[in-house]
Image (cartoon, grey):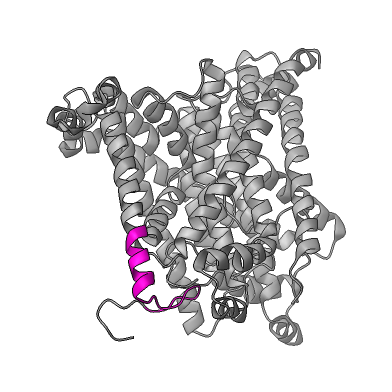
Amino acid sequence: MSILGQQQAGVLFDAPGPRARARQRLYSVLAFVLAIGVAAFVYLGFNKTWEDVLDAPGSLFTAEVWQVDEAGQWSAEKWEPFLDPAIWTDMVLPGMMNTLHAAAVAAVLAIVFGIVFGVGRLSEHWWIRAFCGAVVEFFRAIPLLILIFFTLATPLAANQLLGVPFGTFQVSPLTAVIVGLTLYNGSVLAEVFRAGINAVPRGQAEAAYSLGMNKTQVMTFILIPQAVTSMMPAIVAQLVVLLKDSALGYIVAFPELLRGFSLIGTRFNNVIPAAIVCAAIYIIINLALGRLAVWLERRNAQRGKATAKPATAPGVQDVGPADRTGAAAEPRGRGEPGGPSGPPTPPAR
Amino acid sequence: MEAFLDNSGAIIDGFSWTVRLALISALFSFILGVVLTAMRVSPVPLLRGMAAVYVEGIRNTPLTLVLLFCGLGLNSGLGLSFHESVQWNVYWLAVLGLSAYTACFVSEALRSGINTIPFGQIEAARSLGLTFLQNMRLIVLPQALRSVIGPLGSVLIALIKNTTVASVAGLGVQEASRQMKLMFDQGVVPVIPTFIGFAIGFLVLCLPTGYLFGWLSKRLAVAR
């Protein structure tokens, strides 16, 4: 175990000997060839020269097929818009501001909604528990998009039910997106807060009661602050989901980041460069948020505070050499594994 | 109520597309997710890197963008086409996008399942001389799968809900949410009953799935 280039043994395999290393080199080469093949196909396809190759397979090895085609997506002029400051200030930034605006407002509202309904599910009165449980379960089980469509149709509903004439009030796509994001993510966060409050050591509440605090005071001054602190990583992870879901606004013509890029794509006929730049922006923002969640979790661990996790999600640690970045303690929600599915599980005491 | 009943054909049609999208995408995303998981823990650094870049990249991209790319990029740009008829073509494009996206979450869930396997199991398998692939196939994946049935159920529910995004302009699968939007746009159906009807439709799809996976995860939990 000391010669140059020796790999460390991972969890699932031993340190490779000479034959294994030779085999791994072979696999690496195969994987590399496969990746290059896919990349070449994509390059030629968007270069508009793939048809030429299909017509005459021999031309794959000629230079003109590989040259950047003016009509293709890789030509310099298709990328030039992104070097133009005016494009960024006129089309990208307004969209970005709209996305961040919707996400920020929805995030604040969702956290408030989550605290209210999370506490409501722990109420001593059965009807409050039942009501909050029904609301949370309902909004978690229906697609966000349907919620947004419904919010947009509320003027029509008001007209049908109450005879409110059209035009009395308008629902803008921004409002619809914020309402949808708030109700859905707020419901997911309600479960997070409920788990967080249950995870606060029992002695805390008992000590507070013994000091003569009433239920409301115990909740407000003792339990909620500690639950929010311990659940911070899960909350931030949910914000990644919320930010990604704000792109659904595209479907209801809300002028957010993705729509800004699709406008650029149609204007300059550069769909692919636009998609690549747009994805890069989302990935950078979300990876930063993911890092923040991991950092918060570490900080909690260093301060000796537990990061509470709902009982349903298996904790994620490192597996072997796979470097884990991004995801926080508790990936949950839309397209995220780990949320409680179906029946609410009894809180772990 | 009349207007709603007149649309029952469209509603059933919409939900049939939803179910088809969800089932086929679930199958493909599961296969791809297992492959990605194996790549992420494999001894070959290049494979690990490729899988990590794929998962981290796609996972942090909005699904709307992924499906829009399938419609505008792959179909209009690359000329990728699966079927002569338009509705089946956009269906398969949507399946491609949904599978590529969901596979990341399947892979993340499975990787967290590998953590639950006692270290000794894997060491014992290695000491018996099992190769990496044998180890994965016989020891690791079966146990990991059984421990992540619950999270996989959540992924499946999320996938059922995510099929609504396939209605995005530029793709336009005629699934349930699009049918509902079309009805609202006509402005003749009663809004609230229609919304509740569609919501119940999704509840009927999602809640039993949740209970089934919850039951399965208890039933198949690895006794330790």
Residue at figure coordinates x 36%, y 71% from the top left: A19
Residue A217, given in percent of the width and then of the height, sits at 69, 73
Q: Quadrant of residue A267?
A: top left
- Coordinates of residue B66 in the picture (x, y in percent): 44, 38
* Front residue of this view, candidates A266 and B159: B159
User: Does any portion of residue B108 appear in the rendered image?
Assistant: yes
Count of numbered marks:
0
- Above or below residue A204? Residue A281 is above
Q: Is residue A9 magenta?
A: yes
Image-quadrant location for residue A203: bottom right
Which quadrant: the C terminus of chain B? bottom right
Q: For this rendering, which residue is in front, B186 or A328? A: A328
Position above or below: B128 against B211: below
A104 relative to A56 in the view: left or right: right
Is B181 colored magenta in this rendering?
no
Identify the magenta region.
A8-27
Q: Residue furthest right?
A: A126
Q: Is residue A105 left or right of residue B161?
A: left
Let me know if residue A107 appears in the view.
no
Residue drawn at point x = 58 percent, y = 40 percent: A180
Tell me the quarter of the image containing the N terminus of chain B: top right
- Residue A177 location in percent, x, y? 52, 38
Work out whether residue A282 or residue B125 is closer to the camera in this orientation and state it.
B125
The residue positioned 66% from the left and 77% from the top of the image is A200
> Which residue is at a point 51% across and 20% down the rendered structure image?
B83
Could you say where residue B190 lies in the image, as x and y percent from the top left?
73, 20
